[in-house]
Image: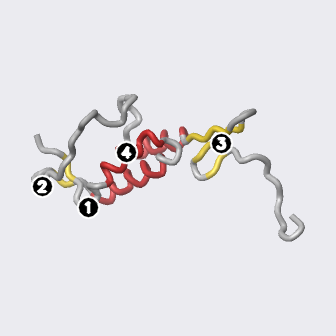
Amino acid sequence: MKEFEMSDLGLLSYYLGIEVNHKKYSIEVKQKAYAKKVLKQFVMEDCNLNKYPMEAKLQLGKDVEGSLVDPKEYRRIIGCLRYLTHTRPDISYVVGIVSRYMEKPTTLNQ
């Protein structure tokens, strides 16, 4: 403070979508508000809750004959999910898997 003009704003509580709660012996970080914002942005507020983010032993592959999905929208979703992994490491594996299909995303035709 002697070298530069600054002010003390106290303990960090919110920064770039990350909520910080200071406890007696720990610091808790979460992105609850950001996650809700992402769900609302992609019209998924009413999606089903699930303890596990992916089916066990699910095999994904390229579907050449599938219906094309807007690649910009798909990348936006993946980007939001990647940012969410800062406080949710449990979804890191799944986000990595779906990130493999950013070049030409499609939906499965059944």
**Is 73 rendered above or below residue 29?**
below
> Based on the displayed image, in which of its 4 quarters is residue 104 positioned?
bottom left
The residue that disc 4 covers is 93
The figure's colour scheme reads: secondary structure
Look at 37% across and 41% down and name the residue there: 43
**Is 102 rendered above or below residue 39?**
below
Q: Which of marks 1 and 2 is nearer the N terminus?
A: 2
Say which of 110 and 51 sits in front.
51
Check contact, mark 1 vs mark 2: CB within 8 A: no
Look at 21% across and 42% down and name the residue there: 59
Q: Which of marks 2 and 4 is nearer the N terminus?
A: 2
The residue that disc 3 covers is 20
The residue that disc 1 covers is 103
Relative placement, left or right, of 18 versus 96 is right
- Amino acid marked by disc 2: Val
Say which of 92 and 75 sits in front.
92
Position in image of residue 12 (x %, y %): 71, 47
Q: Earlier in the sequence, mark 3 or mark 4?
A: 3
